[in-house]
Every structure is written in C-alpha cells, then in structure tokens.
Image: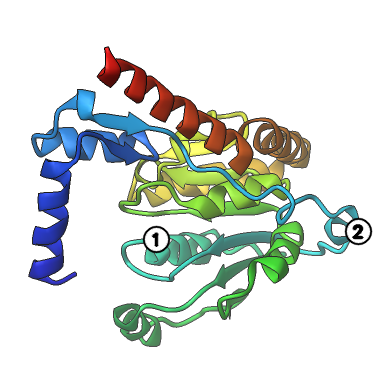
Amino acid sequence: PSKKMIQKELEEYQLADFISVPSDFVKQSFIKYGILESKIIKIPYGVDLKEFEVISNEKKKIKKFTIITTGTISFRKGSHYLIETFQELSLSDAELIFVGPIDYEFKDWLRKKDNLINIKFVKKKKQSELKYLYNNSNLFVQCSIEEGLSMVQAQAMACGIPVICTENSGGAEIINDGQEGFIIPIRNKEILKKKILELYNDRKKLDLMSEKAHKSASKNLSWKLYGKKMIETYKNIIREKSK
C-alpha cells in the first residue's frame, strides 16, 4: 500500500472510538503499536452456510489424499512452505491443489522449482464452484505468515474438511487445536509434515475431524450469528455511551 493510504488508515484508527477485528492475532498487533485494548472489539467472521456445505456425492469421488488451499498464492500466505513440505513428504497417492491467483513475485520463485509433481494450480473460482473443490478434498492447509482471519478456513470447515493453519492466520479463533484441525507455528515445515502425516495415516481420525469441523461451522460460524454478535455489541456501546 502507498504511504498516503497507510497514513490515512493510521489517522482513522486514532479518530475511531472502537476498532473491530476478527482475531486475537490482529488485536495483539494493535496493542503492540499503542492502541488501547479497551478500544478493540474482537468478533470472528462467519461463513455463508447456504453457499458452503457438505455434498455427500462429491465426497465419494475422492481418489487421492487431496490437500487444498485457497486464496492468493504468495510468500505472505506461506505458499512456499506448503509446496516444500509436500515435496519432502513425497506421498505417491496424494495431491496438493492451490486455488487462486499467483502473486507476481511468487511466480519467479515457482519458475525455479523442479519436481512440482502432483501439485496443481487452479485459477480463482466463483464461490458457487469453490465448494465442489472443497468437497473433493481431504484436508485444508493455510500456512499464512500474517493474516487477520482467513475466511477460506471457515468455508473449508463448512464443507467438512479439517484445517491445519498457522497461529498467524486467525484460525485459532474458529478451530480448537486437535479437534477440527491443528494450529501450528509459522515457518515450521517439520510440524506441518507431522500433522499432515498424522491424518494421512489415520483416516478414522481424519473422518472424525471432518465431522467436527462441519458441526462447528454449522453451529458457530454462520454470518447470521456474526450479525447478531455485532448488533449486540453496537447496542452495548450505545447503552454505555448514553449513561
């Protein structure tokens, strides 16, 4: 972003009575740079449960152990860590699918990589099409170095896929570690390998996590619930201000 845009946003943060954020990761970043904790409202985003759902017939079509990740393919998203981890695992009956645009700088890195066997790059899809890709996958992985709350994680959960994500992806707000997926440190390929292998080798655990992910998304992550939380927050603020 331009210096002008950064300055504009900094001024807005100072002028605002409250700042709404989707995760504790974002909250702590504001606090670190001097914003009062009392000024920050934390409410995780939701997902459109009419758009993203489990499609039983699609689940039956899965032939390989399929790992999917969606969004911009970039260094910020940690895409290089996921590619290298998948290559080092060398699972013969597995595939890794990236869905989304490839960042300009990342294209240069990709050109220098060999052995991209069983790694597919799919162009950005409409949400109505994206749910089919989720349903044809076993596991969602998000290796982000920094991100507020990656909404695609909730989309994957709503489609019945467990999620492995980093502490800096905001995923800890919607995923209980070891239940609907795993929360791991950034830039740690060894732990990522371990967690992928754990689910690759234990399909019962994978299925159980898939079920938990879907139930959690259905119960806790609807946009309707997000709206209710936001409205209640606004009401509380107004009540406090009018005293």
Residue under the image location 32 percent in, 53 percent down: 145
**Label 2 vs 1, first from the N-terminus:** 2
Residue 217, given in percent of the width and then of the height, sits at 66, 38
Q: Residue 51's spot in the image, x, y percent?
A: 71, 56
Q: Say which of 215 and 176 sits in front.
A: 215
Q: Is residue 178 above or below residue 75?
A: above
Position of residue 77 in the picture relative to residue 214 (left or right): left
Tell me if residue 14 can be seen.
yes
Q: Is residue 206 above or below residue 63?
A: above
Along the viewing direction, whichever of 39 and 200 lies nearer the viewer: 39
User: On the image, numbered disc 1 is attached to which residue?
Assistant: 81
Contact between labelled residues 1 and 2, with CB atoms less than 8 Å apart: no
Q: Residues within 10 Å of mark 2 (few under 14, many from 20)?
A: few
Amino acid at dot 1: Tyr
SS category of the residue bearing label 2 = helix
Extreme residue in the front direction: 242
